[in-house]
Image: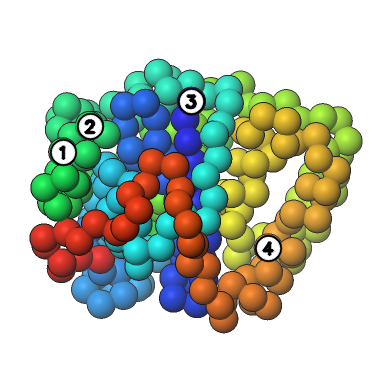
Amino acid sequence: MPTVYIWYPDKDHAYGHAALQTDKYHISFWPDGDVKNELGVLRGVGNGVPGCLIFHHELDRFYEGNRLPTGIHKIVHATDEAINLVHEEFLKYNGINPAKVTLQAGKRLVRQRKKPEVSVPLTKYALIPNQVKNKPSGLPFYQIENNCVSICWNMIVEAYPNYPILPFFVQFLDILLAVFDAVTFQIHDLFTVPWFESHIKKQWVEGYGWNILNVFDNAITRSARYWAWNRWNSNSQTGQKPGFRNFPVVFKALAGK
């Protein structure tokens, strides 16, 4: 069953991070360098910067300040097999050999304390992605700028184009909230990590869409949560998370993002 990993933003990680994992691949999209110090924030927001694929979750943990994910969500509808096919299209477009970036290949590198990452030559990374869903151009999503959220979102949607049907009352409330979001904070929320986690839980986690409390999970409340708490506090997780080591990996090459 595919899994979504969430690292929610906090005082030390303004954007947070999202990744998608199947039975074969770990899919995590980063800029190929430091946007703030090396590549330039304006390029990261505008035309995009070179991208990088991380293919094991321990390196995501490392780049997120050695903090464990704040959320791990098993999703339904989109299967491992279907997402794998979409991911392999992305890899083929970028000239990357799928056999070299499997989850198993990543595990071998992690055991050697080598970073499981590869440069993505054609798909650009942008802080604000150029979302092509329903655009007239009809370009595949991997031919335009993406961030970590839009890569995951598009792969899930491409793998299961029949969008999950929500209960009627949830659809009605979502329509009302969408109108409210459109004239308030939605522009700051769309395709961010908090937005992604909210929509994954509502639409792709089994049984969650029926929860009436979802009405309180919208762009307004997410923005309020960020500015009232997350922006000033740490989201570091303690204890153990499934699939993660008890202690962070100390990778040999320390220079990175």
Closer to the chain start, of discs 3 and 2, is 3
Residue at horizontal 80 percent and vertical 55 percent from the top: 216
Q: Is residue 112 left or right of residue 51?
A: left
Depth-wise, is mark 4 or mark 1 nearer the camera? Answer: 1
Of marks 4 and 2, which one's residue comes earlier in the chain? 2
Residue 27 appears in which quarter of the rendering? Answer: top left
Residue 109's image quarter?
top left
Give coordinates of residue 21: x percent, y percent: 40, 36
Which residue lies at the image location 48% right of the left edge and 67% below the top edge? Answer: 236
**Is the residue 126 above or below the residue 73 in the image?**
below
Compared with residue 39, is residue 79 higher up or lower down, i.e. above or below?
Answer: above
On residue 1, the disc is 3
For disc 1, the neighbor class at 10 Å (few under 14, some 14 to 19, many from 20) is: few
Answer with mark 1 or mark 3, whichever residue precedes in sequence. Answer: 3
Which mark identifies residue 222?
A: 4
Is 198 positioned to the left or the right of 25 in the image?
right
Q: Secondary structure at mark 1?
A: helix
Distance from disc 1 to disc 3, alpha carbons, whole Å, reads 22 Å
Q: Secondary structure at mark 4?
A: helix
Label 4 is placed on what type of residue? Arg
Q: Which residue is mark 2?
A: 104
Mark nearer the N terminus (4 vs 1): 1
- The three-letter code of the residue at mark 3 reads Met
Q: Which residue is mark 1?
A: 108
